[in-house]
Amino acid sequence: MNLNFSNTHYNHSDSIDMFLAEEIIQWVDWITVVIGLPLILIVMIDQGAPVYVINLLISDLIQLFCRFLFIIIISICYCRYLVVAMPLWYRFRRNIKTYVVVCIVMWLLPLFFLLFLFLTYNPVIIFIVFFLLPIPLFIFFLVGTIKALSGALSVPADEKRRIAAIQVVVLIMYTLLYLPLILLLGFIMESNSQFNITLYTVAIVCICLSPLADTTLYLFIRKSIMDRFLASICSCKISNHQETSSTDYESRSATHTETV
């Protein structure tokens, strides 16, 4: 694949800014690897992680080193949509065979996409369409989930808010992470546009932060992990409160003894 930058005007006097941009990208890349890799391992150790989340974490591991694959996020949103919109169908279709077929299709789609890029005269347009395609799917799953939740009387209100919040956060996260890259590709398509170093830096940094955002989002939506996190905070507060109370009691006892 060869993206043609020959029509994009670049001023060589901006070489210092380009060097600074590459330094920022390199530092962000190392930070995401150092922080993201332990978080991914923590989530993969969690025995309650769904199959599609495991695939997402594997793609994040690959993305930490080659920075690609995000189709699996759509499958997770689709899975959440089916759980709420068609629970009976999802319950009967939830088997190992279905998981295997869906996972194989998800991993083969990027390969077909790369093959199509090599056969295309203008790959930039294909990139833009490829990055824009998940957004209407996310919106469709979000609207369908909200409609299904409005008629689900057996689901508690807190659970409804949590499910809807997950879909909204996924949509916002994807938009914020990949919108700079879409804008950058749009500038590349313009033959008379000047190379924007700032937009280039923001786009690459957002792509580098994608694996870290996926893992952090999963850690915060897991009830067990959040419960343990809140329990540890509460236990720390209780222990600190007990230490403060015991110290105050000892000081009051000492004061009372001196007075007597």
Image (cartoon, rainbow, N blue to C red):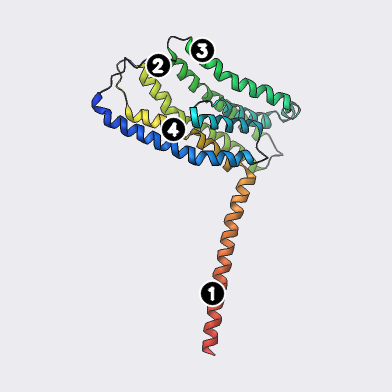
The tag earlier along the polypeptide, 3 or 1, is 3
Tell me the distance, in whole angstroms, between the alpha carbons under discs 3 and 4: 25 Å
In the rendered structure, are the residues bearing label 2 and label 1 in contact, judged by CB atoms less than 8 Å apart?
Answer: no
Q: Residue at x 40, y 38 (%)?
A: 27
Secondary element under disc 4, as helix, strand or loop, is helix
| Quadrant housing the N terminus | top left
Q: Secondary structure at mark 2?
A: loop
Give the residue type that dot 4 points to.
Cys
Residue found farthest to the bottom? 260
**Eye-nearest disc, 3 or 1:** 3
Q: Position of residue 7 (x, y in %)?
A: 31, 14
Query: Which is nearer the N-term, disc 2 or disc 1?
Result: 2
Residue that badge 4 annotates: 206
The quadrant where residue 179 appears: top left
Residue 18 picture quarter: top left
Name the kind of residue labelled 2 in the image. Leu
- Type of amino acid at the residue the image marks with label 1: Asp
- State the residue in front, 231 or 46: 46
What separation in Å lies between label 2 and label 1 (alpha carbons)?
70 Å
Picture residue at 52% right of the left edge, 83% below the top: 255
**Residue at image mark 3:** 116
| Residue 238 place in picture, x, y as percent | 59, 62
Left or right, residue 104 beside residue 62: right
- Mark 2 or mark 4, earlier in chain: 2
Pick whichever of labels 2 and 3 is earlier in the sequence: 2
Q: Viewer-nearest of labels 2 and 4?
A: 2
Q: Residue furthest left?
A: 13
Marks 2 and 4, how far apart at CA: 20 Å
